[in-house]
Image (tube, rainbow, N blue to C red):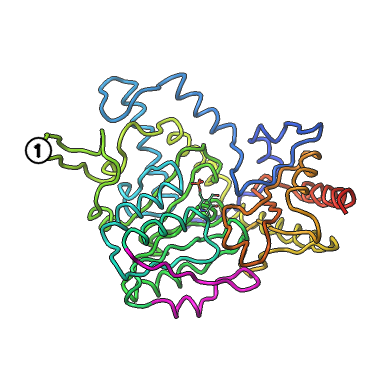
Amino acid sequence: MAESITITPTFDVNEIRKSFPVLEREVNNKLLVYLDNAATAQKPQSVIDALSYYYSNYNANIHRGIHSLAEEATAAYEATRVTVQKFIHASYPEEIIFTRGTTEGINLVAYTWGRQNIHAGDEIIISTMEHHSNIVPWQILCEEKHAVLKVVPVNDNGELLMDEFHNLLSPKTKLVSIVHVSNALGTINPVKEIIDAAHEVGAVVMVDGAQSTVHLTIDVQKMNCDFFAFSGHKVYGPTGIGVLYGKKKILENMPVFMGGGEMIKEVTFEKTTYNNLPYKYEAGTPNIADTIALKVALDYVTEVGKSNAKKYETELLQYATEELKKIPGLRIIGNAKNKVSLISFVIENIHPQDIGVLLDNQGIAVRTGHHCTQPLMKRFGIPGTVRASFAMYNTREEVDKLIAGLQKAIKMLA
Ligand SMILES: Cc1ncc(COP(=O)(O)O)c(C=O)c1O
C-alpha cells in the first residue's frame, strides 16, 4: 500500500496580505496598520469580487423565480448555507438561519424561544464580560416576564469565576447565554464545561460566537450548544450578514419571529401556516449578495487553514504582549491563560481616546472606548481601553509600528 503523505500548507503572511487590497492604502501619509479586526475584519479581493459579480451577472430575487437568474442566485445563496453548516459542523443545513449579524441572532432567540419558555421567577445566566448585545435582549425579556438575570463575575485576569457559575446554576436556570471569546479582553471561555453543567440542570445554552468564529475551530455538535450566533463581517465577509445556528428540534418548536413573505406556507385571512426551517425565520427578501459573498470568505479561511492562522496569530499575540509590557505605565486588561490575538490596555494618566487619535495620525487603526462592554469596564474601574486586535494578515513589523507609535504618543501626551 502506498504511504500517505500529509502536506502541511505553509502559512505565508506576505501572500495573505496580497489578498486584502485595503492593506495597500495609506492613512495620513503612512501605510495603513489595521489593528481593529475585532470590530470588523478587512475583506479579501475574492469577497469583493463576489459582490460585484453577483450584481453584474445574476442579481435576482431568490426562491420564487423560475427564470435563470433567479435559479442561479438561489443556488448560490443556498450553497452558502451548506458551507456555513460545514464551517461550524452543524448536523443539517436547515439549522443555519441567515440574520444580519450576531445581534439579530441573539434577539431572534430572545424574542422567540425566550418569550415561549421564560416565565416569572425563571433565571437567565450571563457573565460580566458580555457584549451589550448579549445583555440587553435578556434584560428586556426579564423585565417583561419578571424573570431574573444572574451574572457570572470575572477575576482580575479577566477569566470567568467558574465556581461562581456552578453556584448560580439551579433548576430555576432556564437559559445560559455566554460569550465564547470576549471582544474586550480576548479571553476564551470554557464553553464546553458551561454547556455540560447548564444541561445538567435542564437549561438551554446560547453561545455568542462573534469573536470566536474567526479564530477558533467551531464544532457546534461537539460543543453541544443549543444556539450559536456569529457575524460574517468579523470572518472576512461582508457586513449585514450573520448566522444563527440552532438545534433542529429546538428551532422546529419555536414560535415564528418576523412575519412576511417566504416564512409562510399558506396565508388566508383566517389563518396562516408557516414554512419549514430555515425559511420560517427568513421573512422577506434576504441579503442575497452578502450571503453569497460570505461563502467566499469562509472558503478563504478554510483554504488558509484555521489552525495555521491560529498558530500564527498566537505567536503574534505573544510578541505583541511582550513588547507592550515593556512600555512604562502600560497595563494590560485581560491576562487570561486562554486568549485570542487581542490586547486591551490602558496607560497611566492618559485617556485611551487621545492615544487612538495620535495612533491614527500615524496610520495605525486601533479601537478605543468601552467596546460595548460597559459593565466589564466598570468591573475593572476604567472608562475604556485601547484595543489592538490582530488578524491573520497582521505582522511583527506592524506590532513594532504600534509600539513606536505608542511611545511617540506617550511622549506627546505625558
Ligand atoms: C462578543 C460580541 N458579541 C456581539 C457582537 C455584535 O456583533 P454585530 O454588531 O455584528 O451584530 C460583537 C461585535 O463586536 C461582539 O464582539
| Residue under the image location 55 percent in, 63 percent down | 129
Q: Position of residue 314 (x, y in %)?
A: 67, 59
Tell whether 278 sits left or right of 355.
left
Q: Which residues are magenta?
A: 146-169
Q: Quick one: SS at disc 1? A: loop
The structure residue drawn at horizontal position 33% and vertical position 47%, both measured from the top left corner, is 93
Write down the residue under mark 1.
Answer: 270
Image coords of residue 221 (percent x, y): 38, 61
Residue 327 in the image: above or below residue 411: below
Q: Pick the residue in front: 117 or 14.
A: 117
Q: Find out whether residue 412 is within the magenta segment.
A: no
Residue at 49% across, 37% down: 296
Image quadrant assignment for residue 384: bottom right
Image position of 290 with respect to 116: above or below? above
At 44% from the left and 44% from the top, the residue drawn is: 242
- x and y percentages locating residue 371 in the rendered image: 61, 52
